[in-house]
Image (cartoon, rainbow, N blue to C red):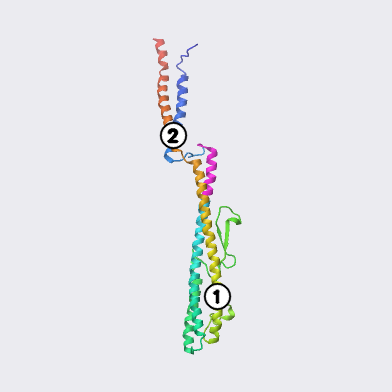
């Protein structure tokens, strides 16, 4: 057995220093994991886990935005539905006026007064149709009656992730045929016109009820979509958390072990650094 005495190379100290540097790096990693609560703070911590977590994060972010899209769609349809409710209420009043005007007890002055209110109500229908907007987009003037509006309610670019909704026009010109209008309005200035108006207004109420039912059905569909997307996002986020989140108990246990190793390493390094002193004793 030989003893290696050298002042130019202290192999023991170099080996201990290398181990100490490794332990210090592990301690720094533990500091980061414990302080952030994340086991993976960079790709170097777990390359495969980092790649998977980033993909999951992308999906969760997209799902959350799809949820917001669907909720915005619900708000838009609620705006349209609320305006249609107002128009339905107006049509109900118009129906009452038409029935009143159709009675033979009304004189010409009565019919003119009834017709004046009847026309004013139609003006209000047109106002609602032209002024009901969502994010500056007019909803009930026929803009979305044919091509519809497309809601992006999932995370890919396929048609499965899109929902197209049409919103019918509900102005007087859309609710009633042009041949039935005089000066752009239904009139009840005579008993005959009033009797005709009864059928036309009741048909408009039926049509508008169908439009409202269609809008309500889409609202229900979007509500279920939001629930499903939220469930998917929550589950995916939980799965991502199992990859990236720090197991605090395990991390602190490792941290305590690393601190002990660091203290032992420093003590051993101090002992190894004293090895050259033995050579000085040989020279005395």
x and y percent of residue 167 in the render?
55, 67
Q: Which tag, 2 or 1, sits closer to the chain's start? A: 2
Name the residue located 58 percent from the left edge and 55 percent from the top edge. 161
x and y percent of residue 240 in the render?
51, 44
**Mark 2: secondary structure:** helix
What residue is shown with label 2? 28
Q: Are marks 2 and 1 in contact (CB under 8 Å)?
A: no
Q: In this view, does 208 lie above or below 10?
A: below
> What segment is highlighted magenta in the picture?
44-60
Q: In which quarter of the image is residue 149?
A: bottom right
Q: Which residue lies furthest to the right in this view?
A: 159
What residue is shown with label 1? 204
How far is the residue under mark 2 from the one under mark 1? 74 Å
Name the residue located 53 percent from the left edge and 57 percent from the top edge. 224
Q: In this view, does 160 lie above or below 276?
A: below
Is the stretch drawn in magenta largely helix, strand or loop?
A: helix
Residue sitting nearer the eye, 270 or 208? 208
């Amino acid at each position: 057995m030989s003893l290696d005495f050298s002042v130019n190379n202290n192999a023991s100290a170099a080996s201990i220093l290398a181990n100490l540097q490794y332990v210090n790096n592990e301690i720094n990693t533990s500091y980061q994991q414990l302080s952030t609560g994340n086991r993976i703070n960079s790709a170097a911590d777990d390359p495969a886990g980092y790649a998977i977590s980033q993909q999951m994060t992308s999906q969760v972010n997209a799902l959350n935005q799809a949820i917001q899209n669907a909720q915005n769609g619900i708000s838009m349809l609620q705006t349209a539905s609320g305006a249609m409710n107002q128009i339905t209420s107006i049509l109900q009043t118009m129906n009452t006026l038409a029935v009143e005007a159709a009675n033979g007890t009304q004189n010409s002055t009565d019919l003119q007064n009834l017709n004046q209110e009847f026309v004013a109500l139609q003006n209000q229908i047109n106002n609602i149709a032209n002024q009901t907007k969502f994010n500056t987009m007019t909803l009930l003037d026929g803009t979305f009656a044919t091509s519809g509006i497309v809601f992006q309610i999932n995370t890919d670019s396929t048609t499965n992730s899109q929902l197209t909704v049409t919103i019918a026009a509900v102005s007087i010109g859309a609710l009633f045929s042009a041949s039935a209008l005089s000066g752009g309005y239904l009139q009840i200035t005579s008993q005959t016109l009033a009797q005709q108006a009864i059928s036309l207004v009741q048909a408009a109420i039926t049509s508008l009820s169908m439009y409202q039912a269609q809008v309500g059905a889409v609202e229900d569909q979007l509500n279920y979509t939001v629930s499903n997307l939220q469930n998917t996002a929550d589950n995916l986020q939980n799965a991502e958390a199992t990859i990236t989140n720090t197991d605090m108990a395990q991390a602190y246990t490792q941290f305590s072990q690393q601190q002990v190793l660091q203290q032992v390493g420093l003590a051993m390094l101090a002992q190894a650094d004293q090895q050259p002193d033995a050579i000085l004793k040989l020279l005395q």
